[in-house]
């Protein structure tokens, strides 16, 4: 899970000021931006602000390079949650 959040290579997808488009620089992880400090904060603020989750979802599912790590991360989280539920339900009382 940490690999997908912080290390997997993907396009940055933060908004540019000059081009009025998305950043195409390489980023590392779903939660981090490229080498520009503003893009790192912009990607983090998209995660924390629930009004921008639609924009975050659109940038994560924009191409297969971003969709595959996002899908793998969702599967990892779902597997962890289901394993924890089974562990706590199966506890003898």
Image: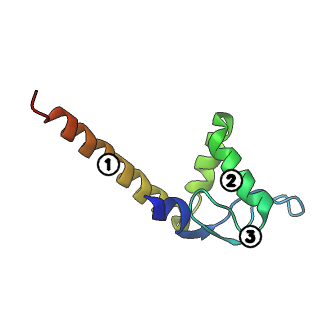
Q: Estimate the x, y position of residue 81 in percent, counting from the top left.
A: 32, 43
Q: Which residue is drawn at 21% across and 35% down?
A: 88
Left or right: 52 in relation to 83: right
Disc with the residue nearer the chain's start (1 vs 2) = 2
Labels in figure, total: 3
Name the quarter where the N terminus is drawn.
bottom left
Q: What secondary structure is marked by label 1?
A: helix
Which mark is first along the chain, 3 or 1?
Answer: 3
Badge 1 vs badge 2, beta-carbon distance below 8 Å: no
Q: Residue furthest front?
A: 93
Task: Say few, some or many: other residues with alpha carbon within 10 Å of mark 1 (under 14 / 14 to 19 / 20 or more).
Answer: few
Q: Residue furthest top?
A: 93
Residue on which disc 2 sits: 43
Q: Earlier in the sequence, mark 3 or mark 2?
A: 3
Q: Residues within 10 Å of mark 3 (few under 14, many from 20)?
A: few
The reply to whether the C-beta atoms of the residues labelled 1 and 3 are less than 8 Å apart is no
Q: Name the residue under label 3.
A: 35
**Residue at 36%, 54% in the rendered image:** 76
Q: Rounded to the nearest whole Å, what is the CA distance between mark 1 and mark 3?
A: 31 Å
């Amino acid at each position: 899970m940490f690999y997908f959040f912080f290390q997997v290579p993907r396009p940055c997808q933060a908004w540019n000021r000059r081009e009025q488009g998305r950043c195409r620089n390489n980023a590392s992880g779903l939660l981090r931006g490229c080498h520009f400090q503003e893009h790192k904060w912009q990607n983090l603020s998209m995660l924390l602000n629930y009004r921008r989750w639609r924009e975050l979802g659109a940038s994560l599912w924009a191409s297969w390079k971003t969709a595959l790590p996002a899908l793998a991360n969702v599967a990892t989280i779902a597997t962890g949650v289901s394993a924890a539920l089974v562990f706590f339900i199966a506890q003898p009382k």
